[in-house]
Image (cartoon, helix red, strand yellow):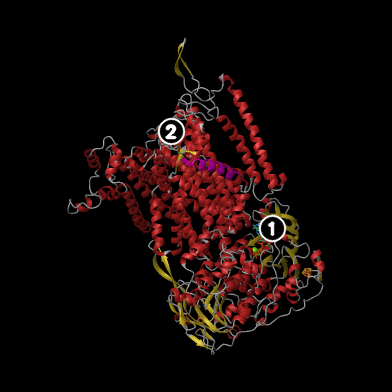
Amino acid sequence: MLAYIFRRLLYALPILIGVNLITFALFFIVNTPDDMARMQLGVKRVTPEAIEKWKLDRGYDKPLFVNAAAGGVGTLTDTIFFEKSVRMFVGDFGRADDGRDIAREIKARMWPSLAIALPTFILGLFVTVSLALLLAFFRATALDFWGVVLCVALMSISGLFYIIGGQYLIAKVWKLVPISGFGDGLDAWRFLILPVFIGVVSGIGSSTRWYRTIFLEEVSKDYVRTARAKGLAETVVFFRHILRNAMIPILTGVVVVIPLLFMGSLLTESFFGIPGLGSYTIDAINAQDFAVVRSMVFIGSVLYIVGLILTDISYTLVDPRIRFS
Amino acid sequence: MLQVKDLRLGFASGERTLLAVDGISFAIARGETFALLGESGCGKSATAQGLMRLLPTAGRIVGGSVQLDGEELLARSEAEMRAYRGGRMAMIFQEPATSLNPVLTVGRQIGEVLERHRGLRGEAARARMLDLLRQVGIADPERRLDEYPFQLSGGMKQRVMIAIALAGEPELLIADEPTTALDVTVQAQILDLLAQLQAERGMGMLLITHDLGVVARMAHRIGVMYAGELVEVASREEFFTTPRHPYTQALFAALPDMTRRGMALTTIPGQVPSLAAMPAGCRFADRCPLVMPVCREQSPAWREAQPGHAVRCHWQGAQAAPAVVSSVADALPSGQAPLLDVADLKVHFPIRKGILQRTVGHVHAVDGVSLAISPGRTLALVGESGCGKTTVGKALLQLIRPTAGSVRLAGEELTGLSGRDLRAARRQLQMIFQDPFASLNPRLRIGEIIAEGMTALGVGGDAAAAVRALLQQVGLPDDAAERFPHEFSGGQRQRIAIARALAVQPALLVCDEPTSALDVSVQAQILNLLKTLQGELGVAYLFITHNFAVVEYLAHDVAVMYLGRIVERGSADEVLGNPRHPYTQALLSAVPVPRLDGAGERIRLPGETPSPAKPPSGCHFHPRCPQATEVCRERYPDGKTLSDTHVAVCHWVN
Amino acid sequence: MSDFQIVVLWSDILVWLLLAAGIGLGLLISRSPPLLAAWRRVGASRPGMASATVLLAFVLVGLLDSLHYRPALESQPGEQTQYAIEVLSVLDALVGPLRTENEKTYSSPLATHLHAKETTEVPGVGTVREFPRLKFGGVHLDDPAQRGGDVAMTALRAVGLAALVWLALAALVAARCGGWAAVWRGRTRFAWNAVLATLGAMLLVLLPVFLLAGDYHVFGTDKVGQDVLYQILKSVRTALIIGLVTTLVMLPLAVVLGIVAGYFRGWVDDLIQYLYTVLNSIPGVLLIAAAVLMMQVVIDTHPEWFATAAERADLRLLALCFILGITSWTGLCRLLRGETLKLRELEYIQAAQAFGVSNWRIILRHILPNLMHIVIIALVMDFSGLVLAEAVLSYVGIGVDPTMTSFGTMINNARMELGREPVVWWSLAAAFSAMFILVLAANLFADAVRDAFDPRAA
Ligand SMILES: Nc1ncnc2c1ncn2[C@@H]1O[C@H](COP(=O)(O)OP(=O)(O)OP(=O)(O)O)[C@@H](O)[C@H]1O
Ligand code: SF4
Ligand code: SF4
Ligand SMILES: [Mg+2]
């Protein structure tokens, strides 16, 4: 198993390198550092000196790939590519525009993100799988029909509406929970209820419908007929036979996102004032802090690749066909 | 024991319910096997599922009565019905590969039934399961109990299905085409097993099949279904000596076998009427050679021809006048220079593993095959599934590049050809595929499909006229050219595929199981067509099949394949009449014969074909061979020449 | 000298090209019976046709909004005509007053007074704080108290008109399709009953809205006094462009790469798989954010490229579509690759190979047509997702140009309004409702299309 994971990790390396190259091209080749400086400084303050200073502050004054002047190893290492891209592989993300160390910031902010994303994920999965099971169980009845109609309606509502509407109704009109903010330690739960609730509700439509399709696909398989021919009750058929098989495709979609939970959600966090990675990213985007955006892109891909590996591993746990061959 | 009266089942389609089974009645006694025989789509499976009340979602029970020992099943509530399913009545299905739950162990799947119907758990249940697995002939049951279905071979899966069915100690076993998906030698094992278990337990059995051979082997009484109705019920003896219904007689007449060589097979014209447009009178009227005016007006009533032999037909005679059989011109004599000469052909597929896709071994799909076909003759390549038949065909056409060996067509070497040279060679060599539904592009018109080869290979001339001529040649109307594949039935599609291949006037046609997806009556049409075309055009066939009846009828020469190698070859008379290789002998004796006297001495092979990824040492056949000795385990035998044409590859043939 | 100068924006070209492509595809489909049969099934689906009717209305608005011009400014005879810097569309011309009749700030739907009190000087009384009358909304009323009656009367007249129009349409359909009974019982091949019912509902809602819009701000006005109804109408085009042009970018990439990878396998396949795994592994929003930020830099540092603000906004919109397309082709590509892998093993492909038909011809004749249903399903399924995505992206600040009206910018501008006392809810409510109707219709239509085209669902 360990050898397997190790090989999987090796395979992930070229992908990370690809991501790294793409981001580098996007951030440093599409526009030159001079262009970026000019835009950030605004039209009025653009002087050659200001641009030079801006670049120096960020370490963008070096050559892109080859620094002939530095000599020795420095020819390759004392460059933007090495400093800004290669060093990401060892967890060095440099500093944000406000001078803070990005890696430290990320470490501090991922916990609030996780505090929201994890309960949302688990509750959401539980709720949507149960609902989908219910619809599939009562397939081709009025319950199923209207359930699907409701799902389509729910998934046609903008995610922004769930947040804005939910916040207004629950926190402002009914005053059940605080509108936004975040607390330390156990105190945090009061602030978590609303975003988690909204997160779960906004996912119901599309996920339920998707899982229902998966269940229905399984329902039509031959082994289900065999199970019925044994005289098993419909509930047993569903829980013992169908659910287990349907878990395999459901897992593919679900396990990948687990590591990404650390990244939090952009919208939820910015609306509820949660000091997590999502709001960090949004702030960086609004402030056009390229270093932070670049770091988040990199971390996002790392987490996604970890998710892929976890998916493979989880397959071997649920699917005997893979476990034993 | 089981009494079915006037059962009617339908499928909801839009606002209407189309009757798939329209009023059938029969009874099964304890210890009796009742076979339900019919072509595809006639409602056999629907009947079986209806008895268990396990119809698919669209299915409806419209009326009738099903009584098990006098208890009316159709009146039971769903919950009560569950006590019958898997308990007093059990069912096995056609596809063992998909009918078992892939993520549960064999033990759990059997255990469920024991728990549900016999209240057994824990140790007691386990002991019973081991017992059951032993009864269905599974070796090493302790290990198998904890395995998953994918770790078992096809035959073993079906054995497990049977064990599941037996676990509830059923009085009635319903078997829906239990051996259709299996190889002949495995089919023989499973049929033996079913017959033996039934005799031991005195179960009633409803056996659903389309195979007259299986019927002859297993049934006590037989019901013939046509278009949702039973048309004839008779005992086995009556059925095989004096079939009464014109449809039954036509089925027998359409069977290919040795005695009909050189003659055209009798076919049933037309098709089964669709559910939506059932004729009012006799449903067979449009295809019946004996049709009378009354047949079209009045649905015939049951008539007792003999005690225990009932027919639904207006016609009162006993045996239909033998249909005029026209003979078809037979092939050129052998002895000419071979058209196709294959020497030591090998196709190995790499097995890749891991992320870097390293090659960890090879599947020896074809492992040194040599054969020759003379112009205008038919060579049948016979073998069980997975032995590499299809791969040989594709390698000949260079659709799969051979790993080694030579393929010479009219003296020209094909391996290694490419581009223009290969295209030129392809005019000589074409293929017809097994699945008539996958072999025609659903998005193209028939005319375009047939003309495709002509344009690609630059066959000149008036394409439209050529297409018309071809359609006529394969017996399709002219206007077919403008239509799309979905408008045609399986048999018609196979005719289109033949027309497409003939369009480039090949000298050799590779036919890969062209009739195995078709019903007997349609198969007869296609075989007749192939035979006629051979007479007219002098095409040679490489006929790939597992059906010995077809081989007997059609082939001039036969080659038998086992695990990527040819084990015996010779003229049809030599190989079929005097088989010398133990495998050929076993294969021939495993084929169920649709005659009363079919039950001759049988050779039963144990086990199943091993994987071509790691073939056994020495003679590949030794683990299953009844005559194997020490030398067989060590050394692969050389071919022994028995006559000019007859060769068998076995140590013990001389 | 004409009264206007035609302006052709890049996105206009694409919109009309799309329309032409749609018509062309329709003609092509009518020659291929299997596809035609599938579309007939869509046509017979009642939810499908009801939603298609709604979608058509949206498309009509979008098309009208895609014919641009610059009006001539007042000029002395003999002088060179000057054209306004502002780019207008046919839609603007049609709804005329909606665009120009701006109030000072917020006013609620159908209001006659502003939403906030203002201090005004009343001669003889001194300064008072009161809700001032609107400049345009309900000015024809002598006494604001008459508003209720006036609105009711106008609405009633509109409903009557709607009924008449609808009856005329229904009679026309019934006459052509074999009578009332056949239409209502659903015995027509085309789901006319659903279309008529939807049309009826739409007429009942839209006619009163538009009749009232002459005298009132039916959905109120926003912070700068602009009519919300007008903004909704303008947002439609943005949403349609995002939803349609993006697929135009994505489609060729996904189709070509997917088929090539699946058909040729080997190193080509490895390369393409690597490419989409890499793209896929960057979380979508972040990739879009990074790309949009960079695009912004390009646009901001090259102001000389754009003659008008409309042109800049337009190009930014297209760039956004492009970025969305580049980041979203991977899913469809993987799907098509998998399907091609299956198709290439099918016997009719092998038969073609046995004839020596060239690979590209096999792809064109045998593979592509048999993937068409997947492509069509993906097209309609993606549309609604893209419309929703636009709102989120604009909200985050990486969407369309802030000067361009879209559902996202509307929501973004109104984000703080629910916090005001008293609440200003109409902008948000109107934007969300319009978006909901559009997306719901798109989703229902997509479902109908999927059911009709998916061979498994049949
Ligand atoms: N789920 C279904 N919905 C609609 N019609 C169906 C369905 N299943 C079967 N039918 C129709 O019912 C009829 C009987 O089908 P059935 O499966 O019983 O035939 P069969 O004799 O077992 O055929 P085969 O030899 O191919 O297994 C056919 O015409 C078939 O098209
Ligand atoms: S009833 Fe008439 S048509 Fe039907 S099988 Fe008998 S003879 Fe033929
Ligand atoms: S060589 Fe031996 S094992 Fe092989 S077939 Fe002959 S007797 Fe059997
Ligand atoms: Mg069947």
Q: Position of residue C29 (x, y in %)?
A: 56, 56
Q: Position of residue A35 (x, y in %)?
A: 29, 43
Local secondary structure at mark 1: helix
Residue C77 is labelled as 2
Q: Nearer the viewer, residue B608 or C306?
A: C306
Q: Which residues are magenta?
A: C50-68
Name the chief secondary structure element in magenta: helix
Q: Position of residue B646 (x, y in %)?
A: 54, 87
Q: Nearer the viewer, residue B273 or C148?
A: C148
| Disc 2 crowd, CA 10 A, few/some/many (<14, 14-19, 20+) | few
Q: Quadrant of the N terminus of chain B?
A: bottom right
Q: Quadrant of residue B3?
A: bottom right
| Viewer-nearest of discs 2 and 1 | 2
Label 1 sits on residue = B50
Q: Position of residue A12 (x, y in %)?
A: 36, 55
Q: CA distance from mark 2 to mark 1?
A: 90 Å
